[in-house]
Amino acid sequence: ETGVTQTPRHLVMGMTNKKSLKCEQHLGHNAMYWYKQSAKKPLELMFVYNFKEQTENNSVPSRFSPECPNSSHLFLHLHTLQPEDSALYLCASSPGTNSYEQYFGPGTRLTVT
Amino acid sequence: GQQVMQIPQYQHVQEGEDFTTYCNSSTTLSNIQWYKQRPGGHPVFLIQLVKSGEVKKQKRLTFQFGEAKKNSSLHITATQTTDVGTYFCAGPSEYGNKLVFGAGTILRVKS
């Protein structure tokens, strides 16, 4: 399954670092999403972009900053993270929002030290 | 706010036994989707149900959408070790811009 790719697959960063996660979809979809998945917790939706416009910010701390330059690319910029931000960060895309099935990337396993 | 709840949270079965997970929404849904996430993997779309009372089958998996379109179930007949993973249901938010996921049911199969 290579429809949605994410890089890097693993990332270890200190609390003072700045890093970016990248997501690319090759499915011609119009909507893209960032989710956070922590151990023993449900999927947490972070951001939704529809036709490059942000349509949802699910009360995410400002140390997470999304960017969607076009419908195929989505970034998540990280700065001054906390250890509790360690999680699997999943990108997904769908033809549109709401009723459409979502296609997930493999995720970035982030560890904040 | 809108909630999608799944039970059980966790189930451990003997290979060959059946398994069922249930999904309940606090609001009526236009459709419901099911996803599977293998250990160490990412969620993968399985199916979408749209009609009231709809039943769909995929080999040993049977999906059902309730008459009131507020609940759904996934039943696996004669589980195999390849069925191991977390099964999520999800429904469109009442505001129409995202999916609301249940917490998932973790299935473990003992051979």
Image (spheres, coloured by chain):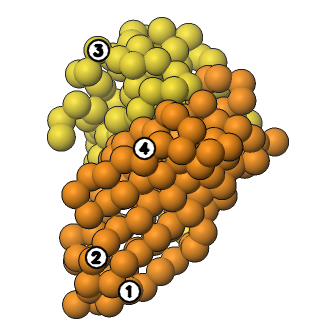
Chain colours: A yellow, B orange
- Disc 4 or 3, which lies upstream in sequence? 3
Is the residue marked by circle 1 packed among few (<14), some (14-19), or many (20+) residues within 10 Å? some
What's the mark number on residue B61? none
Q: Which amino acid does label 4 sit on?
A: Leu
B10 horizontally vs A84: left or right: left
Q: In this view, does A10 lie above or below B11?
A: above
Image marks 3 and 1: residues in contact by CB distance under 8 Å: no
Q: Which residue lies furthest to the left in this view?
A: A1
Residue behind mark 4:
A90
Residue at the spot 74% in from the left edge and 41% down from the top edge: B27
Task: Please name the residue that numbered disc 3 is placed on.
Answer: A28
Whether callout 4 and callout 2 share a subunit is answered no
| Element on which disc 1 rests | strand
Q: Image point 62% across, 23% down: which residue? A: B97
B20 versus A94 height, above or below? below
Q: Nearer the viewer, mark 4 or mark 1?
A: 1
| Residue type beneath disc 1 | Val
| 3 and 1 marks on the same chain | no
Q: Are marks 4 and 1 on the same chain?
A: no
Whether pointer 2 and pointer 1 mark residues with C-beta atoms closer than 8 Å, the reply is: yes
Which residue was labeled with disc 2?
Answer: B79
- Label 1 sits on residue: B13
Label 2 marks a residue whose chain is: B
Residue B88: percent from left, percent from top:
48, 55
Question: With B79 as the anchor, is B43 left or right in this view?
Answer: right
Q: In which quarter of the image is residue B74?
A: bottom left
